Image (tube, rainbow, N blue to C red):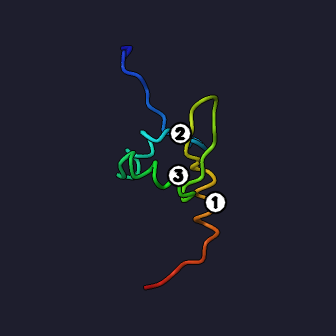
Amino acid sequence: MESDQKMSIPMSVPVVTKARFSEMSGLTEETLRGMIERGHLPTLKVGKHRMINVALLTKECLEQDFERF
């Protein structure tokens, strides 16, 4: 029996839109815009769109020293 449902395969992508990163992080797009303007989030320009570079952000996070409270 064939199904018309689309199969969803989770993929890890190196860059995402502000909207997608907002969904993933729970931060508003306005907050993300400010973080980008201040240089707190790495971005990559793809055509005329500015994408958040999740791969570079992950690398930077993994390279930081772990701080204990």
Q: Which of the marked residues, 2 or 1, is nearer the chain's N terminus?
A: 2
The residue sitting at 60% across, 47% down in the picture is 43
Amino acid on which the number 1 mark rests in the picture: Lys
64 horizontally vs 9: left or right: right
The mark found on residue 33 in the picture is none
Image spot of residue 48 (x, y percent): 60, 29
Res. 40 image quadrant:
bottom right
Give residue 60's position: percent from left, percent from top: 62, 63
Which residue is located at x 58 percent, y 65 percent? 61
* Residue occupied by mark 3: 36
Q: Nearer the viewer, mark 3 or mark 1?
A: 3
Give the secondary structure at mark 3.
helix
Label 2 to label 1: alpha-carbon separation? 17 Å
What amino acid is found at the position of numbered circle 2 in the picture? Met
Task: Characterize the local packing of mark 2: few (<14), some (14-19) or many (20 or more) Cα atoms within 10 angstroms.
Answer: few
First in sequence, mark 2 or 3: give its number.
2
Indicate which label's residue lies in the foreground, 2 or 1: 1
Picture residue at 58% right of the left edge, 42% below the top: 15
Secondary structure beneath dot 2 equals: loop
Q: Which residue is mark 1?
A: 59
Crowding around mark 3 (Cα neighbors within 10 Å: few <14, some 14 to 19, many 20+) is: some
Q: Amino acid at mark 3?
A: Ile
Vertical placement of residue 7 versus 63, above or below: above
Residue tagged 2: 11
